[in-house]
Structure formats: C-alpha cells, structure tokens
Amino acid sequence: MPSKPTVLIVDDELQIRRFLRIGLEAENYAVIEASTGKDGVYQAAVNRPAAMILDLGLPDMDGRDVLVKLRQWSSIPVIILSVRNDEAEKIACFDAGADDYVTKPFAMGEFLARLRSGVRRAQFVHDEPIFRNGDLVVDIANRVVSVRGEPVQLSPTEYDLLLLFVKHPGKVLTHRQIMKEIWGPYHESESPSLRVYIRHLRKKLETDPAHPTLITTEPGVGYRLALQAGRDVGSGEA
Amino acid sequence: MDTTSPSKRGALKIFLGMAPGVGKTSSMLKAGYDQLQKGIGVAVGVVESGEDDSANDVLSALPCIPPLRFASADAPIEELDIDEIVRCAPRIVLVDRMEHINSPGARHGFRYQDIEEILRSGVSVYTTLNVHHIEGLIDVVRQVTGVSCSETVPDRLFDAADEIELIDMPTDELLAKFRDGRIRLPDYLRASAHEFYRKGNLIALREIALRRLARRVNVELTEYMQARSGTSRRVERILVAVGPDAHSEHLIRAADQLASGIDAPWFGAYIQTPRTVGQHTQEQIRRNLELVGELGGELVTAVDNDIVSAILRIAQEKGITQIVVGKPLPRSGISALRARSVAADIIDRSECITVHAVRQDGPGKEIAADAPERPHPGLAARTLRSVVTAVVGRDPIVKRQERRTAALFAFVKDVFSQQGADNIVRQIVRHIESTFQARVAFYAPSDEGEIDGIIHPASTLTQSGPQEVAAAQTALLTKKRSGTSTAAFRTSAPTYYPLVSGSTVEGVVGLGFDPSTRLSIDDEALLLMFTHQAAIALEKQRLRDKAQKAQVLTESDRLYKTLFNSLSHELRTPLATICGASSSLRDGSAAITDQARATLATDIYNAADRLNRLVANLLDMSRIESGTLRVKPEWCDIADILNAISDNLSHERHPVVTDIDDAFPLLKIDNGLITQAFLNIALNAIQHSPDGVPIAIRAWVEAGVPTVSVADNGPGFPGEAIPRLFTKFYRVPGSAHPGTGLGLSIARGFVEAHKGIIEAVNRSGGGALVTVRFPLTPQSQG
C-alpha cells in the first residue's frame, strides 16, 4: 500500500476544518489545512496533496480564483465545498475545472464518498484501450460497446457522447462542455438534443433507464459517468 | 415631415395687461431683446408693429421667422408659421396677442393652440394677453365694462403659464394715451372705445387682473397644500341645471366658479325633453355640454318629461348639496309661468339642498323660444347605473331613448365589472365601436402625463402618425375634443375625445367615422357620458391599483407577525434538539452507550437538516415575495428531476416510487425551481403519511398536457383546508406535524412562475393527491 493520500482543506472556518480533519483522518487520509486562498495555493504547490477541498467564500480571494490559479499547473481533484447553492455558481466552478461540488451543510458520509471517487479518478490511467466500469465495457480501439457482455449498437453521436464520458470518468460535465465537444462551439445551447441523446444512451446502457446509475444527472448542471465501486477502475479501494 | 425632438416642453411667459395700450407688446419685445443680448436665441413669431417708436426699433433689431400670410377682406392676416418655428427651434419665440383667432386656412382654430404646439416642441414662448380675454372672466368683465369679446383663452393655459408679468400703467396715463390717439384699438373695441376707456372701468379691470393673478397663486398654493397633506376634503357637491340655451354657458361658468372657490366637484345635468330641437339649438347644446367637461365638471344627461324631477333625482344620486339654476327673466304671459316654474319647483322641492338662482343676462334671446316644455306623458327613462325599466309606448323617440339608455347601461355595466385597466379599455373600445359605428383608438397617458404614441392593443383604429398623436396629445392637455370637426388639428381624420374625470385625464379615445357620418346631438351627448364613465372606471382602477399596493404593505405586515411567531417555534425546536443532544455528548459520562451516542448524533443531524430546509424555504419564499424570482428555463427531462427527488428522500421512512411515461416530453423549465416544488410536495405527502407507506409520483400526458401527480396514502386533506392549502403559512388545523406552512405555497409560487397549474384533491381511495400541469412548450422532439 502506498503512503496515505494527503488532502488539503482550504476553508476559513475553524469548525469546518476541525470536523473535516476528524472525518478524513478516520478514513485514513493525511490532512493539511489552509485558511486563506493564498496559503491554499502555496500549500498545494509545496505539499502536492492528492486532492483539495475548497471553500468559495475565502477572506482574501474567491475560491474560484484559487481553482483557476491551481489549474494552471495541477490537475489534482478539487471538491468545492460551499454554502452557495445556485446552479450558475456550480456551472462556473465546473467550467473552471472543479471535479465536484458539495453544498454546505452536508452529510459526512456522502462527502467522503465523493472524495474517494475523486481521488480514484485521478489515479485512473486514461490511455487504456479498454474501459471497464461495472457492467459497461468500451473497447475504444475497436469502437465496440457492450453491457453485461451483450454488444450494444450506438449511433455515431451516441458513441461520441459516451466516449466523452469515458474520457472523464466520474467527473461532472456541464451541459455547455458536452454541447461544445459533441456539436461544436456554435451550437445553440437552447437545443433539447442533448437531453434526447442522454435518454437514448440510458435506454441502451442502463439496467433501469428510469433510475440511471451509470450516467447520472447533476441537476441543472450536467451529467457524469458514475464510477462503479469495486470494479477494475483506477487503483481500487485504499 | 420633420419629427419633433423629444426635448423638454418650452416655458410660457405671459405679459398680462388690463387693457390695450398699457405696453405689453413693447415690454415683451424688450424682454426678448434682453435675452438676445445675453446670447439666447430669440425670434419674433408674430408681432404687429405698434404705436411706440422705440418698440418698433427693438422689433426691427430682432430676428424674425416670417409668418404665414392669409388673404382676407382688407389686409392679409399673419399667422404663426409653426413648422418653421419648430424647425428653426429658437430658445424663445415672441408671439403677440395670444387671444387671436386664426384665419380659416390655418392649422389650428386659435393662436393659443399654435402656442401650445410650439411649447410642446420645446421652444419657449413670450406672449401678450389682456385680462378680459381670459375665458373664465368674460362674464364678470362684461358685467363691469359692458364689453364682450369672442376672442378668449382658456383659464387652464393661463394657470399653467410658467411666468406671468403684469404690465401696469397708472390709469390716468393710460387715459391720456387714449385721448391722444396713441393706442391702437382692436376691432372689437373700435365702436365702444369711449365706453371702455373710462376711469371706473380701467380701475375695475386692473383689480380683476390682480385678483385673477392672486387666484392663480392661490390655486398653486391649494394644490401644494393638498399634495402635502395627501387629502382633499370634499363635502360640497354642486350641480348645475344646463338648458339648451346660450344663458346656460353663463350658468355653467358660475357653477365652475362656485365649485372652484370651495374646491368642490361639480356636475352639469342636461335633461332632454322629447321635443325636436332646431339645428341652432343643437349646436348650443353641444357647446354647453362640452363646456361642462372642459371646465372640469361631470356631465349627466337624462331623458325625462319632467325636468325638475330628473334634476332632483340626479342630485340625489350624486349626493348634491348645492344646485345652480337660471333665474328666469321677467316675462309676460304663459311662457313666464312655465319658465318660472322650473327654478321655483326646484327651490320648492329641493329640501335640504341649497339652490342658487343665478341671474340670466347678457346676449341671447333664445330662452323664450327654447324654454323647456313640460309635461309629456308616456315616457320614462333612468340615468346611469339604474336599471332600465320597461318603457311603454310606441313613440319612435321613446324607442330611440330606450336604446340609448340601454346602450349606456350596458356600457357602464361592462366597464365597471372589469378588473384591470387593460380589460376596462377593451370594453370601452368594444362598446364605443358598436354603439357609434366608429373605429376606435385608445391612448393611455404615460407616467409623465403625455401621449407617447403607443396605441392600446385593443384599438381597432390603428393609424397613428405624428398628426394623430399630436391631436390625441392636444385632447389630453386641453381636455377638449380635437381632430376632425373640432378647432384643433382639424386636418387629422379621427376625432379625439379626452376621458376626463375631475382634474385628471385618464386617456384619450380616437373615433374614426365614415366621412359622411356626423354624430347627432343625441349621440354626442351619449358619447360624452360614455367617455366620462370610462374615465371614472379607469380612475377607479388606477386608485384601486394604488390602494392595492398599500394593502400589500399591510398584508405583509400581518404576514411578518405570523412569520415571526411561526419562525420562533420552528427555529427553536430543532435548535433545542441540537443543543440538548450535543451537550449530552460533550458533558455526558462514559456511561452513555454507543447506541445512545448514535441516537443523539442522528437527532442532531436530523434537527440540522430540518433547520436547513426551513432556511431554504424562507429564502425561496422571499424570492417569490420580493419579485426577484427569475425562471431560467432550459430543456429538462422530468425523469431526472423526479428521480433526484426520489433519491433525495430515500433516507426518509417512505419509499418514493416514480412512474414516468415514456411519452412525457422534455419541458423547458427551471430545473432548480421545479425540483424544489416537487420536493416540497413530496415532503408534505411524507409528513402526512404513516411510516413505510409509499409515496407515488407519476408523470404522464393527459389530453396533451404534461401532468405530474404526487399521491400519498395518508388521511387526505380536511375538506375545508383544500382551498387554502397553497396559502402562505396555512397549516391544516390540528396538524400534529411540525411545519411553517410554507412548503406548498412555495411549490405553487414556483409552478405558477412557469405558468403551470397546481391543485390538490382527496383521492377516492383515500389519501391526498397533488397534481401539477405544465403548459405545452414547443420543442423539436418528445
């Protein structure tokens, strides 16, 4: 087993940092803390943590600016932890490169699950020719998709869409990001076509399309390919 | 045609004199010259070279916008070239003799109308006026001096002037000037000049001028005081009995004077007897009726064979405290008896109403011929807002009157039953159109009290060029008809009627007739009543809207208190749990079992969760209440929303089952708001269901309408609660569950913000059912 993964908490509230530390250490993470944005960027550079937990309302700068600075040289998973609950803010953070967004107040259990998933994703090797996630297998080299061993016929657009998710497993992709990748930068963002294709994909891939577990919805923000625990994705459980 | 710039209205300065010869024109020219010296653009519009040499020198030194010339019997007449003045746009234009009546070919009938148009273009006007030309004073001037002139200027223009400079001259000096022949006399004075220029007359005129100026200041003061106190106590209400004769103008003016002296509303009652009247009298009646509206009175007309009864009935309806009637002239024979009896009968039968019998004198001999005749059997009519009673008789006049009364009744009924100004306007247009066979345009005044050229969408007369807008604007400002067959904007095709209620104009209606149509006096009177009632309806609506705003404030005050009471309970309960449980964990002995610790921790978590929902609800409610709720629609799959809710509520002790029809279309909705709406509905269902009982959310298309329902198996809603379920802070009586009564009202707020419909019923098999129906959104694919 490698050494414990280190998590950097950037939050100005002492109480938040304290209970996060308790919860994280109990889950076998090493924890470092910063109470300002500036210190957060510094700590990230010096200590090279495996993930960052970032508050948006920092005393010296907006958390989103911390994210923008960080993304210039680091691709570590960043989980935003904020009281701000509007979709526009969430979308802006995802567009700036956030991996996940958790609204305060939150339950520790769910938060830890999201963190685990973020860390696991970061360790996932992207250039595998075959992508496996739960029942889904995508043979990227041969453009073959199968579910539970059964081959699935996808239209070219459906395949492109699935491939986009496969390239960013577990990560929330905003509607705009997806539209831009699949239909080009000038496509009308008002169009319902994305929702239609997601519906088609779910019908073909999900066990129960009405309750999707593979391509999940981030309400008002976008979609993500949910990583199935315990499968051969990334490094497995710590 | 040049478009007029939307610049500010120009200022009007009047150089007021007591008589010709005091030097108004030369004062005006000098004032203009002074401005020119200061570098301000001044131009002469129309000024006749005068008797004074120095004034003529000044005149020749000033730039001049050449007037238009119109041929006449003797010398050509000069009229203002309005278009050229507007085009040159000097800062100030000098215009002599405001009272001048324009030549037949000119755009407007009167020079003061030219001045008004110039002012509206943003150019300021200096003008001259003698006091005996002020419309409201012509009676008193005639009584004092015996001079009667037809050139008059409406009082409102005088009162609205930005500045009035009284040009005074000692009477002896003026008399000397007159004797030396140094005064250029206007036509109407030529014959009677020696009568006019007498010391007693001049002193009286000077006094009248001063008093009139004082009244203007007083009006300003009264308006200011009323505006400050926000109230105007009106206890007196005055009614003037308007006849078909010229003397009635005098009565109407007297009533206006009386009313304005005590700041009372007043009414002009015209009772039509079923006799045919001659063309001349018709014109006179038309003038009388218009004068009532023009001076700010409310016109009431009725058809009755008994004039006295009709007047007293109207007096009673309108809560009149004072009646103005004409005092009959001494006459001989039977006509004296008849004429006397109207005034005398009113005095006899008026009970506690004060009756002013005003002496009738001055010009006009028609009274004997047109004295109202009585009685005429077999006729019955009722006035406004009274039920039309059955009319017995075969008389065609009776039938016509019956139709007329019915039309007015229908108009009043429809207009006054409407809610909202738009609906009122729709009814106004509809009724005027069908009653008078005209196409109708409606203009509402802007907040600045102007016509901005936007025709109300309900209008059926939709042409609106600069000429039409200017004519409508004139009607608005002058409170008089304008357009075809009127004095102002004669060349524009429709006729514009102001909707006058008291001192405000609530709108302007334009009527476009077939070229051959001319309204009969009957129709004209009926139309004036229509416009007046329309004005009242619109004014009421305006005041209602105002009151409603105030009401909202009171309501929000009450809500604030409810909120406060409810909140302190809703906030303190979970806080008590958190404090209690967490302090037990902190201070408690080691004797607390692990299981107890877990229970305490769960309690803390649930209490915090409840607090969090409460805060979210309060924030949502404040968004709805403050009007800052913005729906950001995007294409959404309802399955995403409903499944998210199902997941969100999975930790509650109720399974949430979703059943979504494949044919359910994508909706263009605000994901966050609709999610919250259904979450609140589902939470409410959970609260009222026994543990473990599933909540069923179903989405399907019913008769083309995307529909989502949330059903529970609880006890259902008490019947009396259903209409109030979605009301803010409403809690089902005796409800054992905690809550603020916000959840469902927020759901309604969010659903209605999407133009959706939300309703609650009890299911036939038990339990409650809340249904949301979405409006159809056009989309490319389902």
Image (tube, rainbow, N blue to C red):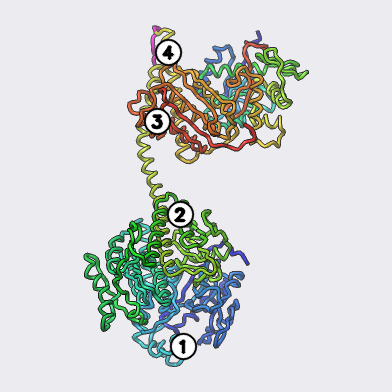
Query: For the residue marked with disc 1, what is the amino acid?
Result: Ile
Which of B610 and B381 lies nearest the eye of the viewer? Answer: B381
Who comes first in sequence, dot 3 or dot 2?
2
Give, as a single range, the part of the protein colored magenta: B583-591
- Which residue carries the number 2 mark? B427
Residue B343 can be seen in this image:
yes
The answer to if A60 sits in the magenta stretch is no
Q: Earlier in the sequence, mark 1 or mark 2?
A: 1
Q: Which residue is mark 3?
A: B741
Q: Are marks 1 and 4 on the same chain?
A: yes
Q: Is residue B257 above or below residue B674?
A: below
What residue is disc 4 on? B599
Please give the residue where the numbered disc 1 appears in the rendered image.
B183
Q: Earlier in the sequence, mark 1 or mark 4?
A: 1
**Where is residue B549 shown, x and y percent of the image?**
41, 47
Q: Nearer the viewer, mark 1 or mark 2?
A: 2
Q: Secondary structure at mark 3?
A: loop
Q: Could you tell me the amino acid type at mark 4?
A: Thr
Query: How many neighbours does mark 4 have within 10 angstroms: few (below 14), some (14-19), or many (20 or more)?
Result: few
Q: Are marks 1 and 3 in contact (CB under 8 Å)?
A: no
Q: Chain of mark 4?
A: B
Q: Are marks 1 and 3 on the same chain?
A: yes
